[in-house]
Amino acid sequence: MPRKNRAEAVKQQRSIAPDTQANTQADSQARSQPVSQPVSQPPSQPPSQPPSQPPDSQITEPEPFRWTDAMVQAALDEAIQQDALGKRAGQGFKAEAWLLINVATQEAIPANTSWKLSVSQTEGKLDLVLTYISSP
């Protein structure tokens, strides 16, 4: 008896299947066609305004870097002190001396600037100054 019920169920599915297949095709066609719906407009708002910017008088560009007399003097003073401490190597200074010379030079940078100095910049300037001083 269970086989008979199963066979009847398969027949029912086959008889329903063509109808279901037609419905499925109709549904897929309906889905593929564009649906015309009204495009919703966002609520009217005033146009967005750019963020407020300070007046031109308040915008300041960073001042370009330039060596000040105080910076050169601080570098020379620290170089003399490092020389007195024996921090020389060959014709120049040891790396630890250059670090201290650079720190002293940076401390002499004017407070109203954002200038930063690398050790190589300090070396270059001090070498130039020492060359200028020692030339006849």
Image (cartoon, rainbow, N blue to C red):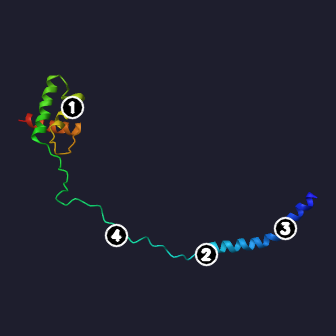
Q: CA distance from mark 4 to mark 2?
A: 36 Å
Which residue is identified by label 1?
98
Nearer to us: label 1 or label 3: 3
Q: Specify the quadrant of the image occupied by residue 100.
A: top left
Q: Is residue 103 left or right of residue 27?
A: left
Identified at 30% across, 64% down, the residue is 50
Whichever of labels 4 and 3 marks the residue nearer the N terminus, that label is 3
Report x, y in % for residue 97: 21, 28
Q: Around disc 4, counting alpha carbons within 10 Å, would you say few (fewer than 14), some (14 to 19), or many (20 or more)? A: few
Q: CA distance from mark 1 to mark 3?
A: 95 Å
Q: What residue type is disc 2 on?
A: Gln
Which residue is identified by label 4?
47
Q: CA distance from mark 2 to mark 3?
A: 32 Å
Q: What residue type is disc 3 on?
A: Gln
Which mark, residue 12? 3
Nearer to us: label 4 or label 2: 4
Q: CA distance from mark 2 to mark 1?
A: 76 Å
Between 22 and 123, the one lying in front of the other is: 22
Nearer to us: label 2 or label 1: 2
Q: What residue type is disc 4 on?
A: Pro
Q: Quick check: marks 4 and 1 in contact, CB under 8 Å?
A: no
Whichever of labels 2 and 1 marks the residue nearer the N terminus, that label is 2
Report x, y in % for residue 63: 17, 50
Whichever of labels 1 and 3 marks the residue nearer the N terminus, that label is 3
Which residue is identified by label 2?
33
Query: Vertically, is 1 above or below 28?
Result: above
Whichever of labels 4 and 2 marks the residue nearer the N terminus, that label is 2
Q: Around disc 3, counting alpha carbons within 10 Å, would you say few (fewer than 14), some (14 to 19), or many (20 or more)? A: few
Mark 1, secondary structure of its residue: helix
